[in-house]
Image: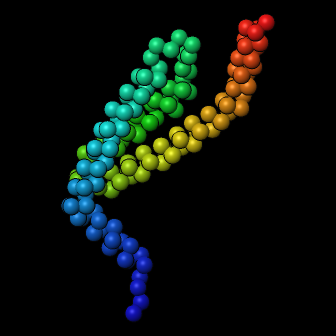
């Protein structure tokens, strides 16, 4: 007995897209996740950038730390609302949001590593100079 892998895969994906219980749970999970993360992203952005006189975010900071993550969270929310009517489109939206969040995480980790390498030594040198002046 031979198994045709593509036919088995197509049948599984087709069954997934037709099963209302699976789609309902996917809609609920992605909708709730998108709503909670949208609120979290908004609150985090507000706390991060409010009232800091020494730090003025540049456009790159707004894009990578606030705008892109919030757009991904809103895409998850929209996918949750869309999954029962257009399941395939909603799955692409979820995949795109996950991939974008992966790239945002990689970029932010790289940005932090560069900041620690370049900026941190100068900040530490200033602190050492201040502490040596205070002792004298």
Could you say which is closer to the camera, residue 128 or residue 36? Answer: 128
Tell me the residue at 42%/51% (across/down).
95
Residue, far bottom: 1
| Placement of 93 over or under 66, stated as above or below | below
Q: Is residue 68 left or right of residue 60?
A: left
Q: Is residue 83 visible?
A: no
Task: Name the residue at the left extreme.
Answer: 20
Q: Give percent across and percent down for residue 92.
A: 39, 52
Pick whichever, 41 or 95, lies toward us: 41
Q: Is residue 106 left or right of residue 115?
A: left
Q: Residue at x 30, y 68 (%)?
A: 14
Q: Is residue 14 visible?
A: yes
Residue 116, image x, y percentages: 67, 31
Apparent side of residue 72 relative to residue 127 in the rendered image (left or right)? left
Residue positioned 38% across, 48% down in the render: 93
Give x and y (percent) for residue 65.
Answer: 50, 31
Horizontally, is 42 left or right of 128 in the view?
left
Residue drawn at (46%, 35%) of the image: 68
């Amino acid at each position: 007995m031979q198994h045709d892998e593509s036919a088995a895969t197509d049948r599984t994906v087709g069954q997934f897209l037709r099963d209302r219980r699976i789609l309902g749970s996917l809609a609920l999970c992605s909708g709730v996740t998108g709503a909670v993360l949208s609120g979290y992203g908004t609150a985090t952005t507000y706390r991060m950038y409010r009232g800091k006189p020494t730090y003025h975010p540049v456009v790159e900071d707004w894009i990578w730390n606030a705008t892109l993550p919030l757009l991904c969270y809103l895409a998850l929310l929209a996918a949750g609302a869309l999954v029962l009517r257009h399941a395939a489109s909603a799955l692409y939206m979820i995949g795109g949001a996950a991939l974008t969040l992966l790239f945002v995480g990689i970029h932010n980790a790289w940005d932090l590593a560069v900041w620690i390498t370049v900026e941190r030594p100068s900040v530490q040198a200033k602190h050492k100079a201040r502490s040596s002046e205070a002792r004298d």
